[in-house]
Image: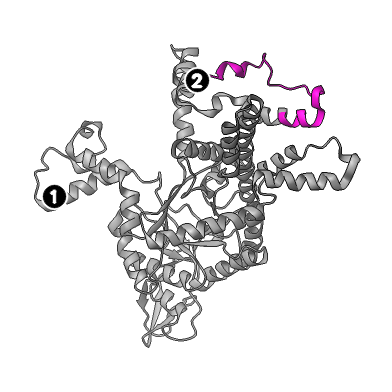
Amino acid sequence: MTYFEEIHRQTGIKHRHGADWQGIDPEFAARLRAQNKFQTGLDIARHTAKVMRADMEAYDKDPAQYTQSLGCWHGFIGQQKMISIKKHFGSTKGRYLYLSGWMVAALRSEFGPLPDQSMHEKTSVPALIEELYTFLRQADARELGGLFRDLDKARKAGDEAAAAKAQQAIDNHESHVVPIIADIDAGFGNAEATYLLAKKMIEAGACALQIENQVSDEKQCGHQDGKVTVPHEDFLQKIRAIRYAFLELGVPDGIIVARTDSLGAGLTKQIAFTREAGDLGDQYNSFLDCEAVDGAGNPGDVLLNRDGKLMRPKRLPSNLFQFRPGTGEDRCVLDCITALQNGADLLWIETEKPHIEQIAGMVDRIREVVPDAKLVYNNSPSFNWTLNFRQQVYDAWEAEGRDLSMFEREQLMSQHYDDSDLAKEADEKIRTFQRDAAKRAGIFHHLITLPTYHTAALSTDNLAKRYFGEEGMLGYVKQVQREEIRQGIACVRHQNMAGSDIGDDHKEAFAGEAALKAGGEHNTMNQFAA
């Protein structure tokens, strides 16, 4: 429905109520409707699921159409990211938000900073989803408010061309509301707990939920040691629970991202239930590190029948069982195929380094069974990208027989090498990593989990050093405000960003000439009008 069609609809509603509604302006009602396109979180989830499905279909046709996101830990961060994207690129297409469980634990828990071990309040996850969408919807309202002002100004000046242009911009407005891929960790409990939390997250607006195959009560960050996986059937119960949550809430296009941590997980808490040789439980157990047993074994032993022989799985004092070294990739491939065959839509393979051929090697095997398999990949700040890629170039040059006498492989992070040809080639590989991995390794979506955690720390450190040092107030003005003005950062007019002008619009509609508005000539934000 166009802007003027909505005005006509609101006019009809007013007329039905007669004189009792004489103070109601149908056009302002139409503006409020435009500024609040999404009435509920479920409206958002349904809309963004369709957006993401369309993007997945586009990627299947052309791997150059991969998508990206940055992790956000506050609604304001997510809002500013999408405002910046629209400012620089004109469209939000292919750009999402990522909600990181790591950042929720570290920054949003009432217990204070916590490690990524599912110890934070699980309700804080849907609360952050709701907060992110509140800020994104406010960004819509703010931007449309500016377009309405342009329309009013053009009308007042009698400029029909400008008015038509403003109306077209209103009708074609692209929302800041984009898909959020939300981290549900390992489900925060059993399948029922996963289902209940998934519903809360979907009701808040999430169209895509990412779940991992670790044990809930032993969950670790994907880039830390001590990860413990569960048998496939336990994980599939949670995938089914999430799908039922989507279906119950009327979001059939909802997306499940199945993450495997098996590459770096050498332990399991359970031996899988097996009905017959070669079934999924038996395949899981085949990766256990076992030793032959003489006789009936020792008291307390857990024994497996492997090819007619009794075998004792290696059990640690923690009562966890150990996988055979070197089986991580095989387990990842089996995890991924199994998840896709049981309702998952996208995969996530947590790796220890960003290496395209390592990822592609596993994806090639997965695609032998599921040809359209696609990945979400964590371009993690836990990787030392500079060192990793310089070492990859070093190894490639070494294989070519090039002279490397001027380099020390383990010291390649040093600034001493920054201007070298090796460092420049490594930086170019980093620059094209997402594009190359999308084409070669089946990566549909690239994300950075914790970028705003690191940018907040870095910018705060720089400001503190300057402001509390010799620069004083110049440390803020030169490095922050002056750059905001010159780069056109919307937040330089922070009153406007916080909704002051939106509030003025409301006051004028509610109170008319009696409205006490904040945006008058004495508002210091006018200093930034230019």
* Number of marks present in the image shown: 2
Q: Is residue 54 above or below residue 124?
A: below
Provide the residue designation for mark 2.
481
Report the residue at 47% width, 13% height from top. 474
- Kindly identify the amino acid type of the residue bearing the numbered disc 2: Gln
Q: Secondary structure at mark 2?
A: helix
Q: Residues within 10 Å of mark 1 (few under 14, many from 20)?
A: few
Q: Position of residue 505 (x, y in %)?
A: 71, 30
- Say which of marks 1 and 2 sits in front: 2
**Residue 250 occupies which quadrant of the picture?**
bottom right
Asked if one can make out residue 181 in the rendered structure from this viewpoint, the answer is yes
* 269 displayed left or right of 441: right
- Kindly identify the amino acid type of the residue bearing the numbered disc 1: Glu
Report the residue at 17% width, 51% height from top. 396
Q: Position of residue 402 (x, y in %)?
A: 9, 46
Provide the residue designation for mark 1.
398
**Residue 10 occupies which quadrant of the picture?**
top right
Q: Which residues are magenta?
A: 505-530
